[in-house]
């Protein structure tokens, strides 16, 4: 047979259009995108100074900004010597593997030099890039130039994009998704990568040198390098496309073609994680920074109502009111980032139409058949309580925000809408065909009016321009303060003798805040607020950014409840030359008491800088205090340094779940039946420690009376400590052991097998409780 498709399903050919018309169409779409972007956001395109302050200076934007700064200044974001002082921040426990975006950022940084300007320009670049890739793919599937341009522009300006702003920086960079969907829809069509149709033979054979195949490989690699979430959704949709293509073409090769592309994404994903995998093999797998629970797929699930309702802050008041009523947090469950997923009227019509067509009891032609099947599958995967929740519960809870698949659905919904309009005009004759361009220009105008909320196209004193001016004011106020701080430390550096000096100087961020993804402190200091000092300085190291669960993080946690005098002593011993206090963590009375104590300890002559205006920061220079300790008792000072820097540490990594407050984690550690602890000895001499802990099973009904009760042992396995605790129950069993720890790192495995009839109480699957853990070094005889 000549084609795997019935006549109604035959894939279209690309409309024949002169190349210069295509080029002008792409240029017009990109120009329109830039015009909408700069006029709508009220940006001064030629004012370089406007880009020197970030558009967003809060929340997760402060997580990504240091990555961008490190990439621009040193070429990689994986290690940062100026965070986690006196250690080094390493992101291998919290891998950010968007290497495609980092490559683009690196190129922009080489051109402009300034990390903040680079940060803003990459965000702005995602709009024309998305328009370009979206338009390109729509054209590849036979849409006319105005239809493809309209689809690309409306896809670039989805609320999913601009409402995330620079907070969800890499999620806003979804310009690869159209290319991923191109390969997915090829498989639905029957254009199978690596299995081209040979019409003269009427069958398919595997061909390594296949153009579609190589495009599939390249797109698969790019997809894997553009974010773990988008890679996961791509694999799921490719698998669904393989099943659909198998049904349509009648050959298993459709499924095998999809499997090859999924394999490419998987291999490239593993390669992206290679630095993290190598690090964790060497230093232990730390699950605490990325702990996720299966129920979170329902908390962050997609809600169909959120997709089809108007965008929040709609330009027409009745629609804005309707959305505001729905978004009332007190009345709706799971109100979170899924509020940023509306498709707009054009996309919503396409989405509803595709869902309806999925239930039509007849075989649909191209492209509606493939689009409706893929849309239905993506909706079932992402919706609350859908297939994504099943996957999270049975496979891995790491993919929790399944609502983010909505941007894949948006691409298909817009495809359906513009395809239907384009087909209508293509079937007309006479004057109606000349209305094609005006119709799609009108569609763009209608779509943008509906998708872009009331923060766009406002005067300079309103909307986005006003918000950016407020952000810039705060940014420059911080810049002035931290530059002054850096100048003071530079001037006082010579007070410390060279043999005692650490370069560059280090400043401790107080109060302690875990990294990453910490709870707010008094609803005022959020996860990454402490990183601002790093962004504004050039030669200062900062304590913030120590990976949770690792050595320096545990040392900083131990400072949480220290009195002021003990806190200063320990900070100086760790090598810090400054203490930066964020006053928002305290009530006015609490800070007044802390400030009085620090001034009494350090002396009135110590430089103490308050951020002007309504600033949040107070800086205390510890240099004079350090100089005093060195001058009066150098031996005691060096002993203090050794105690802080060479201290023994117990790291509770894989399988341990902590619910206690910072600094009190040892009080109670819940762990899974298989857990791993690492004991570290940073010196070159073996050291002996006494370890005490209470062991119990947290489910009281496991303990049974009578002779038929089977013991529940705990096996502790390592090269330095092998022991079996013969039987555990819900009553704490106090244990005490003396262990010699050679130099280096030593893994201690905890293995406790639940009985066959054990039913876990929650999705964390905890079974063993380690309480009141205490490790004390025993002096050598």
Image (tube, helix red, strand yellow):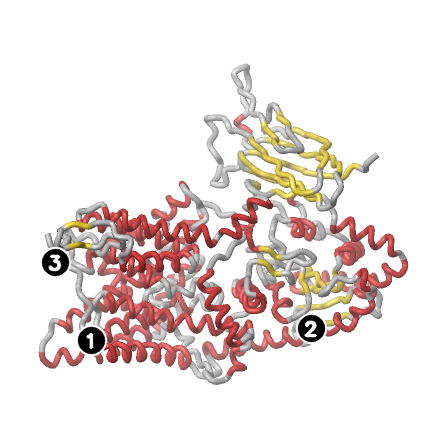
Q: Taking 635 as reference, is 514 left or right? A: left
- Is 463 above or below relative to 746? below
Mark 1 vs 3, N-terminal side: 3
Foreground mark, 1 or 3? 1
Q: Dots 1 and 2: beta carbons under 8 Å? A: no
User: Where residue 588 appears, x then y in whole percent?
Assistant: 70, 65
Q: Dots 1 and 3: beta carbons under 8 Å? A: no
Mark 3 vs 2, N-terminal side: 3
| 478, 72: nearer the viewer | 72
Foreground mark, 3 or 2? 3
Which residue is at a point 68% across and 61% down the rendered structure image?
509
Q: Secondary structure at mark 1?
A: loop
User: Where residue 542 appears, x then y in whole percent?
Assistant: 67, 62
* Quarter residue 395 falls in: top left
- Residue holding disc 2: 611
- Is 203 above or below relative to 84? above
- Is 427 above or below relative to 92? below
Numbered badge on residue 17? 1
Numbered badge on residue 8? 3
| Label 1 Cα crowd, 10 Å radius (few <14 / some 14-19 / many 20+) | few
Q: Dots 3 and 2: beta carbons under 8 Å? A: no
Which residue is at a point 15% across and 59% down the rendered structure image?
10
| Label 2 Cα crowd, 10 Å radius (few <14 / some 14-19 / many 20+) | some
User: Where residue 297 appears, x then y in whole percent?
Assistant: 42, 49
Count the numbered circles shown.
3
| 433, 747: nearer the viewer | 747
* Quarter residue 604 falls in: bottom right
């Amino acid at each position: 047979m000549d084609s795997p498709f019935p006549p109604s399903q035959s894939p279209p050919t690309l409309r024949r259009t002169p190349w210069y018309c295509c080029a002008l169409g792409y240029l017009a779409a990109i120009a329109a995108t830039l015009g909408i972007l700069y006029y709508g956001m009220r940006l001064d395109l030629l004012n370089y100074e406007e880009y020197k302050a970030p558009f967003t200076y809060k929340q997760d934007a402060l997580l990504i900004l240091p990555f961008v700064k490190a990439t621009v200044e040193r070429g990689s974001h994986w290690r940062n010597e100026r965070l986690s002082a006196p250690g080094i921040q390493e992101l291998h426990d919290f891998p950010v593997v968007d290497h495609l975006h980092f490559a683009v950022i690196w190129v922009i940084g080489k051109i402009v030099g300034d990390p903040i300007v680079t940060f803003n320009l990459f965000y702005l670049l995602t709009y024309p890039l998305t328009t370009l890739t979206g338009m390109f793919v729509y054209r590849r599937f036979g849409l006319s130039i105005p239809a493809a341009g309209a689809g690309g522009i409306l896809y670039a300006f989805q609320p999913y994009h601009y409402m995330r702003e620079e907070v969800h920086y890499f999620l806003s960079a979804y310009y690869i998704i159209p290319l991923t969907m191109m390969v997915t829809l090829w498989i639905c069509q029957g254009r199978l990568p690596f299995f081209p149709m040979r019409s003269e033979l009427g069958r398919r054979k595997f061909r390594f040198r296949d153009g579609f195949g190589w495009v599939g490989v390249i797109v698969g690699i790019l997809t894997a390098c553009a974010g773990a979430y988008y890679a996961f959704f791509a694999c799921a949709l490719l698998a669904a496309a393989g099943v659909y293509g198998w049904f349509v073409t009648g050959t298993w090769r459709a499924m095998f073609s999809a499997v090859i592309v999924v394999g490419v994404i998987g291999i490239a994903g593993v390669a992206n994680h290679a630095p993290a995998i190598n690090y964790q093999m060497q230093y232990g797998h730390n699950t605490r920074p990325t702990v996720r629970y299966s129920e979170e797929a329902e908390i962050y699930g997609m809600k169909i109502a959120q997709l089809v309702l108007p965008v929040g802050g709609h330009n027409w008041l009745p629609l804005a009111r309707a959305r505001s009523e729905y978004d009332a947090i007190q009345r709706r469950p799971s109100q979170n980032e899924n509020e940023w997923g509306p498709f707009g009227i054009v996309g919503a019509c396409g989405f509803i139409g595709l869902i309806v067509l999925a239930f039509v009891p007849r075989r649909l032609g191209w492209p509606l058949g493939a689009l409706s099947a893929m849309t239905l599958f993506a909706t079932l995967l992402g919706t609350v309580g859908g297939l994504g929740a099943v996957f999270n519960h049975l496979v891995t809870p790491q993919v929790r925000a399944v609502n983010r698949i909505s941007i894949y659905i948006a691409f298909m919904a817009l495809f359906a809408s513009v395809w239907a309009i384009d087909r209508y005009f293509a079937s007309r004759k006479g004057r109606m065909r000349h209305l094609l361009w005006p119709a799609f220009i009108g569609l763009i105008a209608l779509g943008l009016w509906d998708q872009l909320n009331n923060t766009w196209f406002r005067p300079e004193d309103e909307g986005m321009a006003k918000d950016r001016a407020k952000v810039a004011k705060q940014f420059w106020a911080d810049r002035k303060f931290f530059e002054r701080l850096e100048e003071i430390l530079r001037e006082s550096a010579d007070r410390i003798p060279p043999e005692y000096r650490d370069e560059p100087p280090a400043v401790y961020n107080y109060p302690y805040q875990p990294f990453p993804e910490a709870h707010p402190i008094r609803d005022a200091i959020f996860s990454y607020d402490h990183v601002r000092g790093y962004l504004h300085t050039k030669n200062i190291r900062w304590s913030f950014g120590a990976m949770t669960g690792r050595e320096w993080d545990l040392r900083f946690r131990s400072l949480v409840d220290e009195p002021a005098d003990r806190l200063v002593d320990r900070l100086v011993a760790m090598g810090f030359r400054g203490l930066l206090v964020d006053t928002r963590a305290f009530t006015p009375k609490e800070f007044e008491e802390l400030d009085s104590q620090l001034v009494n300890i350090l002396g009135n002559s110590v430089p103490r800088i308050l951020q002007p205006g309504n600033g949040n920061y107070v800086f205390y220079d510890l240099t004079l205090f350090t100089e005093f300790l060195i001058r009066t008792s150098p031996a005691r000072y060096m002993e203090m340094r050794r105690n802080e820097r060479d201290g023994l540490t117990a790291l509770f990594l894989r399988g341990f779940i902590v619910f206690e407050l910072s600094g009190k984690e040892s009080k109670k550690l819940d762990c899974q039946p298989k857990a791993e602890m690492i004991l570290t000895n940073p010196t070159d001499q073996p050291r002996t420690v006494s370890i005490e802990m209470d062991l119990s099973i947290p489910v009281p009904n496991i303990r049974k009376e009578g002779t038929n009760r089977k013991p529940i042992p705990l096996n502790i396995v390592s090269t330095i400590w092998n022991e079996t605790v013969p039987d555990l129950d819900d009553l704490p069993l106090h244990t005490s052991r003396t262990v010699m720890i050679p130099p280096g790192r030593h893994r201690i495995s905890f293995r406790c097998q639940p009985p066959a009839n054990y039913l876990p109480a929650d999705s964390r699957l905890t079974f063993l409780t380690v309480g009141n853990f205490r490790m004390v070094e025993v002096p050598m005889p």
